[in-house]
Image (cartoon, rainbow, N blue to C red):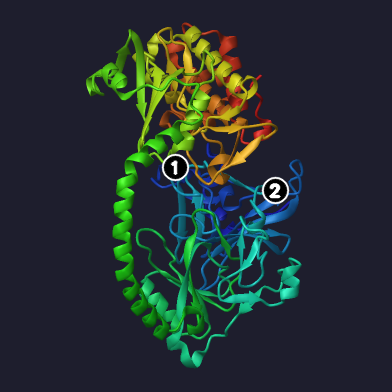
Amino acid sequence: MRVLFGQRARLKQARKPIAQLLDSGNLVLRDDEDRSSTKEIYLWQSFDHPTDTLLPGMKFGWDLRTGLNQRLLAWKTAEDPCLGDFSYAFEIGRHTYHEAYLYKGTEKYYRAGPWNGIGFSGSPELRPNQLFKFEFVDNEDELYYNDIHGANRIKIGDSSSAPRDHCDDYDLCGTNGNCIITEDPVCQYLKGFKPKSQEKWNFMDWSEGCVRNTPLNCLDKERDGFKKFFGIKLPAALHSWVNKSMSAKECSKKCLSNCSCMAYSNSDIRGQGSGCILWFGDLIDVRKFPLGGQDLYIRMPASELGEKAKQKVRVVILVAIAGAVSGMLLLLGFCIWKRTGFKEEDNNEDQGEGLDQLPLFDLSTIMSATDNFSVSNKLGQEDGQEIAVKKLSNCSGQGVNEFKNVVLISMLQHRNLIKLLGCYIHGEEKLLIYGYMPNKSLDFFIFDQMKGKQLNWPKRFQIICGIARGLFYLHQDSRLRIVHRDLKTSNVLLDDEMNPKISDFGMARTFRGDQIEGNTNRIVGTYGYMTPKYTYNGLFSTKSNIFSFGVMVLEIISCKRSRCLHPQLDGLTLTGHAWKLMNKGREIEILDSSLRDSHSSSEVLRCIHVGLLCVQQRTADRPNML
């Protein structure tokens, strides 16, 4: 057992020392005589000594006044709290930029990258939003990171998820290498560099790294310049220097004035960027991200950047060519204008290809049904049938393929899926014609205290079962397995009998054959309904639908939004509060008071348990839609 009490002098001065376990999980020692003080003064607190999990309110970093290292230490196993192989700690230096490292024993295993004002450079997907709020403090007294809301809980152990991919392995590509996860092999060399041993590099032994094609010449350093690299995880700050008040221009000049300076970047990327980090010597643990990342300016000799004289010649040549090209463009533009009508007709035919099983409405019919798209007549009636017309926005990012995908999915017939009646395509205009749902969407009722009274418990239970039937069809019985990717209460419509209809398949993805998982760089959806795996890494599967279903079930029961932090729920999210009550055996308390008179306890408890099973973090732990 470790002895953690190191403030004996202060303890002796306490007139009435007491121990108290706070609601946050913090075990504190304080003087009961200080109870009248407006500020809590702790003689000692367990939050100063984290174990394997960083809880909300804990500080991960250093107390520079006392030299206390507030690091995370893994357990040996899930059942054995003895020290394990892994630890997570900040490495600090006097003038270097501080970074967090994951260690396996004494060996560096993963590097989070320096803090850039928004998040860690090595985790560009983690950005503050309604769900996540981070705090990073770096001053003379202390250096620490804290997740204020606790939504992004850090836990280290053998089953932790860092590194996330091969490029997260520390220094995988050696010095001056660049890891690109989408390339094969993943290790590439930066422009202006070459492998130190080409033979070893060819056999994918990258340990020796890379060297410059042309060494920097300090005698002619005025001719050196910088090449900008985009989307980069900044190099390790082992040999770095930081100034938080410098501009980018001053930073560049500072680097050029030192022969050993190899690269620079902003230390803070907020706004237009500010501050300065300089790197000296080789660049270590560099990777390029598919999305996100930072700009890194690497110093290059003039020979790698191109001679200024050559640049002038290029300008003269380009000016001469520009005149000739402009005339050709005018002629080409005239030809294109002449052919526009024919191409537009061809384009309409191409866009309509594959939609032959669906009725194609002409514009006059739709305009008649909607009174020329009148705002006051959002409901159209053509031949007595009520319809809803949805126009795809030009700025939605959804092209022809996405439009066809929506049509393909919406043509599936099930009583709990919205019915697509037809469509209209002309040029960039794309309209979808649905059966009209008079009772709007589910969120219209459950988050409104007055309208919610129209949905008693039997009706809500019927809606939950209807959504489940619709998802079961999408997962099991349809010819394609479908992941909705934006399943939420506002995308569940209610017909005149309050039967649920899953709608809005604009972001959906289809799986064929034995495919069970997909990934994307375009993260879409609504926070609170998205799985952590999808939010961070873009990975989705049918279990993503199940997670969203579980969130909706809890919302239907509690009449509270999942993505908000509720003061009446101890500042927790809905799912966090539900788990807390579940652990205490009081889960029935999340039932909204308006449903107390009409509910069946067995049905409510069953739905709560199913909802919580569906929102488990590990994909494999979530049930199937059976």
From the viewer's perspective, is the residue at label 2 or at label 1 nearer? 2
Q: Secondary structure at mark 2?
A: loop
Q: Residue at x 61, y 30 (%)?
A: 542
Give residue 441's position: percent from left, percent from top.
40, 20
Give the farthest residue toward the bottom: 219
Q: Quadrant of residue 367?
A: top left
Residue at image location 26% in from the left, 18% down from the top:
368
Q: Earlier in the sequence, mark 2 or mark 1?
A: 1
Give the camera-side residue of 440 and 235.
440
Dot 1 alpha-carbon crowd within 10 angstroms: few under 14, some 14 to 19, many 20 or more: few
Point 61% across, 36% down: residue: 617
Question: According to the image, label 2 marks what residue?
Answer: 157
Residue 395 visible, this orientation: no
Residue at the spot of label 1 = 35
Residue 162 seen in the current view: yes
Q: Nearer the viewer, residue 396 or 334?
A: 334
Amino acid bearing label 2: Gly
Dividing the picture into quadrants, the one containing residue 540 is: top right
Q: Residue 390's spot in the image, x, y percent?
A: 36, 26
Residues packed near mark 2 inside 10 Å, few (<14), some (14 to 19) or many (20 plus): many
- Secondary structure state at the residue bearing disc 1: helix
Q: Is residue 158 above or below residue 302?
A: above
Q: Give the spatial CA distance, label 2 vs label 1.
A: 39 Å
